[in-house]
Image (cartoon, rainbow, N blue to C red):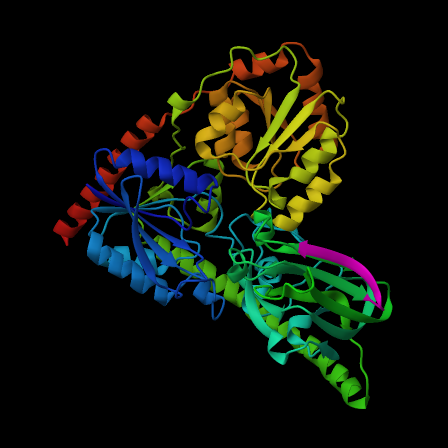
């Protein structure tokens, strides 16, 4: 059978749950079938929407360069350029069946094309991307978790994708001044070509950016309201990563005083290749805000290009300097009133996306839902219930060995996964402060997805036993878990069926998880403890139970439910592929 797997991102640059699962499935299927992988990658050095062919562990790969330079909101989920490349791959590979793992960075039109060609399709829904345009977590770092779908809330969350102003809490009335779109009061640079507007990538989207090759200084006169703050990310251009040169110091000055500084040296510090967050609170009133960049050492000016990504003053505005500007402010107030119409249009755009998802879903032969929780959510959203089945993940169980030496009381705890806000690491750190000092917490995760958050976490960890050990390659996960006494999954979003919980079961260690979504579903059957999400005291109580109660860790680990093996899962998938192929063939014959 010729099987095409389609996924949004892939190894080695992306090592999250969906990518690891897709890798396992593709390589296992390739033992008996002809398998290919189609995925996207952000490749600023490559032409946008170009196609690269390669191989991964014996599997043919098709990599689409998608640099996230979207013209509008709709292009994020219906992308004609991506669809044209997918048609090229379908013509070349000629699959008997297509298994879609994810469509973020791709296009709903892929499903339409498969249906039009009569190619049988299976799609696994790994999270909420069908209902959530902002990454699929139904979680916003400022607005929080979305427990109920509401187009008005989605409009606020996705506002930057529509070119609209983001509605951050506490800033909706005061406004948010986008400095990337404002004219500076002054620009100091030895060469006017050093300072210009561009778009840099941040959280998977191209954001307006002031590029400021050092030495440079941009000055803005601003008026800050109550609770105002300057916020931005600083980043180096990818061209600086592998070239000779120095570092760059980015500094924020307020009224002549330095208030924040970030030094980036991407050549010597690989973690500096990702954007770093900068935030400076502003007292109410008028201020002179200066964004400064300087090379370090001062004479290392070559290959030092960097910029201020999406710089803004939440709760602020430009200070009017004359009557003309005062008139402009009056016009801005009128525009704010008219902005209600913009918000209505944004809500309508969100609802159109939902309608497009439901329409495209009608062409999919079978949806696989790893958790009953997500199956229920998708049924309520309007996906056809008769074409959805519960099908949990399979794992390379042979790689794991259950701990035979688990101690009576847990002392070494671990988190493993992406270090991002919705994963709830800040809740875990606060909870862990209340554990005795001989307890350990190993934080195993890459900071690449949210560097600013990761840096903040490291600075806020107060317990002496907390250690940030970096990302763990998938092949090393069994060995890592063999050295810990309990696994913690402190997510504050509605997880589907977390791979880490299954891995904890396989390793023979108890799992402590927030009582949300698919996490609850897995642990209610045994194997760990649940606590109320967002509650560090409840999490602390669960951790203390494992620390203090003799035999609890062993008892919980022994009660863990069985985990499906990868071999069993792949056999299950092949049976499902055959089922949809037969159904398609019969429908074609009847027609």
The image position of residue 478, as x and y in percent, is: 47, 25
Residues 23 and 57: in front is 57
Question: Which residues fall within the magenta stretch?
Answer: 254-263
Classify residue 114 as left or right of residue 229: left
Q: Would residue 108 be found to the left or right of residue 423 on screen?
A: left
In the foreground, 391 or 217: 217
User: Residue 502, can we see it?
Assistant: no
Q: Position of residue 216 (x, y in %)?
A: 69, 71
Please, which residue is most extreme toward the left here? 589
User: Hey, which quadrant is residue 209 in on the image?
Assistant: bottom right
Which residue does the image show at 66% across and 47% down from the upper left?
453
Q: What residue appears at the point 51 percent right and 50 percent down from the top-left corner?
A: 136
In the image shown, does 76 or 138 lie closer to the viewer?
76
Q: Quadrant of residue 256?
A: bottom right
In the image, 559: left or right of 141? left
Does residue 129 sit above or below 416 in this rendering? below
Quadrant containing the C terminus is bottom left
Percent x, y for residue 124? 38, 43
Q: Main secondary structure of the magenta part?
A: strand
Location of residue 358 in the rendering, given as x and y in whole percent from the top left corner:
40, 56
Quarter of image, res 287? bottom right
Is 258 magenta? The answer is yes
Q: Is residue 132 magenta?
A: no
**Residue shown at the point (42%, 42%) measured from the top left:** 19
| Count of all numbered marks drawn on residues in the image | 0
Q: Residue at x 16, y 51 (%)?
A: 588
The residue sitting at the bottom extreme is 324
Closest to the observer, 495 or 193: 193
Quarter placement of the N terminus: top left
> Could one spot residue 318 in this view of the protein?
yes
């Amino acid at each position: 059978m010729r099987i095409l797997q389609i996924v949004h991102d892939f190894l080695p640059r992306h090592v999250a749950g969906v990518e690891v699962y897709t890798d396992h499935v593709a390589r296992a299927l390739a033992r008996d079938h002809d398998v290919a992988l189609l995925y996207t990658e952000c490749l600023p050095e490559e032409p946008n929407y170009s196609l690269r062919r390669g191989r991964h562990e014996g599997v043919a790969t098709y990599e689409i360069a998608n640099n996230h330079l979207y013209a509008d909101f709709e292009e994020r989920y219906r992308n004609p350029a991506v669809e044209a490349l997918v048609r090229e791959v379908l013509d070349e590979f000629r699959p008997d069946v297509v298994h879609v793992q994810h469509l973020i960075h791709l296009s709903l039109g892929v499903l339409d094309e498969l249906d039009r060609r009569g190619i049988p399709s299976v799609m696994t829904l790994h999270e909420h991307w069908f209902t959530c345009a902002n990454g699929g977590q139904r979680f916003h770092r400022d607005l929080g978790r979305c427990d109920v779908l509401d187009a008005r809330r989605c409009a606020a969350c996705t506002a930057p994708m529509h070119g609209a102003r983001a509605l951050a809490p506490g800033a909706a009335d005061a406004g948010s001044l986008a400095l990337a779109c404002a004219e500076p009061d002054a620009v100091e640079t030895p060469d006017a070509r050093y300072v210009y507007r561009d778009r840099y990538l941040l959280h998977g989207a191209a954001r307006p950016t002031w590029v400021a090759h050092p030495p440079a200084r941009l000055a803005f006169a601003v008026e800050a309201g109550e609770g105002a703050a300057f916020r931005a990310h600083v980043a180096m251009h990818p061209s600086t990563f592998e070239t000779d040169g120095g570092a760059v110091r980015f500094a924020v000055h307020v009224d002549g005083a330095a208030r924040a500084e970030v030094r980036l040296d991407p050549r010597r510090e690989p973690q500096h290749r990702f954007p770093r967050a900068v935030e400076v609170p502003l007292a109410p009133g008028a201020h002179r805000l200066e964004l400064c960049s300087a090379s370090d050492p001062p004479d290392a000016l070559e290959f030092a290009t960097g910029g201020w990504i999406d710089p803004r003053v939440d709760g602020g505005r430009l200070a009017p300097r004359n009557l003309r500007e005062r008139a402009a402010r009056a016009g801005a107030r009128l525009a704010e009133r008219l902005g209600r119409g913009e918000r209505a249009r944004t809500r309508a755009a969100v609802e159109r996306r939902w309608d497009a998802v439901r329409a495209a879903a009608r062409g999919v032969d079978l949806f696989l839902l790893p958790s009953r929780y997500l199956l229920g959510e998708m049924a309520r959203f309007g996906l056809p219930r008769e074409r959805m089945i519960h099908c949990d993940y399979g794992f390379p169980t042979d790689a794991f060995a259950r701990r035979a030496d688990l101690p009576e009381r847990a002392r070494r705890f671990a988190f493993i996964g992406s270090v991002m806000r919705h994963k709830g690491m800040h809740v875990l750190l606060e909870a862990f402060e209340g554990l005795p000092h001989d307890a350990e917490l190993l934080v195993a995760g890459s900071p690449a997805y949210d560097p600013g958050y990761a840096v903040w976490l490291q600075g806020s960890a107060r317990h002496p036993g907390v250690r940030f050990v970096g990302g763990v390659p998938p092949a090393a996960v069994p060995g890592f878990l063999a050295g810990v006494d309990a696994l913690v999954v402190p997510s504050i979003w509605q997880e589907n069926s977390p791979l880490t919980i299954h891995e904890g079961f396989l390793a023979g260690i108890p799992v402590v998880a927030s009582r949300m979504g698919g996490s609850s579903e897995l642990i209610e059957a045994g194997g760990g403890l649940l606590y109320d999400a967002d509650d560090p005291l409840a999490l602390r109580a669960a951790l203390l139970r494992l620390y203090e109660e003799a035999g609890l860790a062993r008892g919980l680990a022994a009660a863990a439910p069985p985990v499906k093996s990868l071999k069993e899962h792949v056999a299950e998938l092949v049976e499902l592929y055959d089922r949809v192929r037969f159904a398609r063939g019969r429908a074609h014959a009847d027609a």
